[in-house]
Amino acid sequence: MPITCKSGCGKNAALKRPKTGDALCRECFFRAFELEIHHTIITNNLFESGQKVAIAASGGKDSTVLAHILRLLNQRYNYGLELVLLSIDEGITGYRDDSLETVKKNRDDYQMSLKILSYEELYGWTMDRIVAQIGRTNNCTFCGVFRRQALDRGAKLLKVDSIATGHNADDIAETVLMNILRGDTARLSRCTDIKTGSNDDSSNENCIPRVKPLKYAYEKEIVMYAHYKKLVYFSTECVFAPNAYRGHARTFLKDLEKIRPSVIMDIIYSGEQLRFKDTVKKPIRGTCERCGFVSSQQPCKACKLLEGLNRGLPKLGIGKKSKGDRMIAQQEKELKLRERANLVKNDF
């Protein structure tokens, strides 16, 4: 016997929401999903009328749904926003080059301007070349650090007021777990923030706020929304992702979700309520002396990783600073020995 929609519209239910367990028809699911995101935006004051907002677009389900819904809500509730798409080309053959074609399709469908920046033009390296140097270990560190800064660089070029990212509830719960497992109190204290990098935190003009409108949206519901709305998105996993540390946290979270569906929201709420003693040392946001972008260390992580690549020491920025200093000292010592050897050779 068909199950009727719980909203009372009289139609037969087409799906069961993973987040609430409610049986809803498609139209009521769309309405509920969109209204929840609207509520998230309004209650957290993510935007102000007249602002220019860059949507971090990768072509995946999250950024595609984010672009679709922000455009929809902007028109429906008159947010007064100028929306643009910002994509980063990491230089991953067989993955990013294909996904960018999807982004271009979204650009045409949603009638938004699109800016694409590549690692090649920003750093002189592609992820394919970086992986050839570093191997399949720690490659996600390079990609994550460069991508975060690349978004800041792109946002500055576009002169936007904020960057909207497609981080969903599953992503944030995974990040909480990862930071707990790594004992990373600095990131744990801010990873659940729905708005980060506001101008109140730093006087740096390169510090552009980032917002997460999909913070409380389940990944499964994002997929269902994209499927029933027939949105065009790219679903292939990054070829370098299987070895990522996040994958282990994701697997653990999915196992927990089978036992307790509310575990995703439970973890997020727990992360939001965490408080640290005043004696816990927290990083101070400042400006990188090399690139001028926001950093809590000197030089910033991106500049340190880039220095390692250019020096032929790809692991320079991985691990403790003291280890990196020893690597540089050893390299400079070897260079001096080579210079002396060449001088002696030229004397004969």
Image: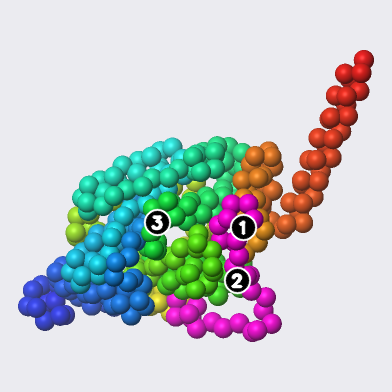
Q: Report the Cα–Cα distance between label 3 and label 2.
A: 29 Å
The residue lying at 61 percent from left, 73 percent from top is 185
The residue lying at 40 percent from left, 38 percent from top is 94
Residue count near mark 1 (Cα–Cα under 10 Å), binned few <14, some 14–19, many ≥20? some
Give yes or no for residue 142 being in the magenta stretch: no
Left or right side of 130 for 100: left
Residue that carries the numbered disc 3 in the rendered image? 159
Tag 3: amino acid: Lys
Q: Secondary structure at mark 2?
A: helix
Q: Report the Cα–Cα distance between label 3 and label 1.
A: 20 Å
Residue 229: x, y in percent? 19, 59
Tag 1: amino acid: Cys
Left or right side of 53 for 329: right
Question: Which residue of the protein is positioned furthest toward the left in this rendering?
Answer: 10
Residue 50: x, y in percent? 29, 66
Is residue 43 placed above or below 287 in the rendered structure? below
Identify the image quadrant of the C terminus.
Answer: top right
Quarter of the image for residue 159 reads: bottom left
Colour convention of the picture: rainbow
Residue that carries the numbered disc 2 in the rendered image? 186
Residue count near mark 3 (Cα–Cα under 10 Å), binned few <14, some 14–19, many ≥20? some
Residue 288, labelled with which disc? 1
The residue segment tinted magenta is: 268-295
Secondary structure character of the magenta stretch overall: loop
Identify the image quadrant of the N terminus.
Answer: bottom left
**Among numbered discs 2 and 1, the one appearing first in the sequence:** 2
Tag 2: amino acid: Ala
The residue lying at 49 percent from left, 40 percent from top is 121
Left or right side of 310 for 91: left
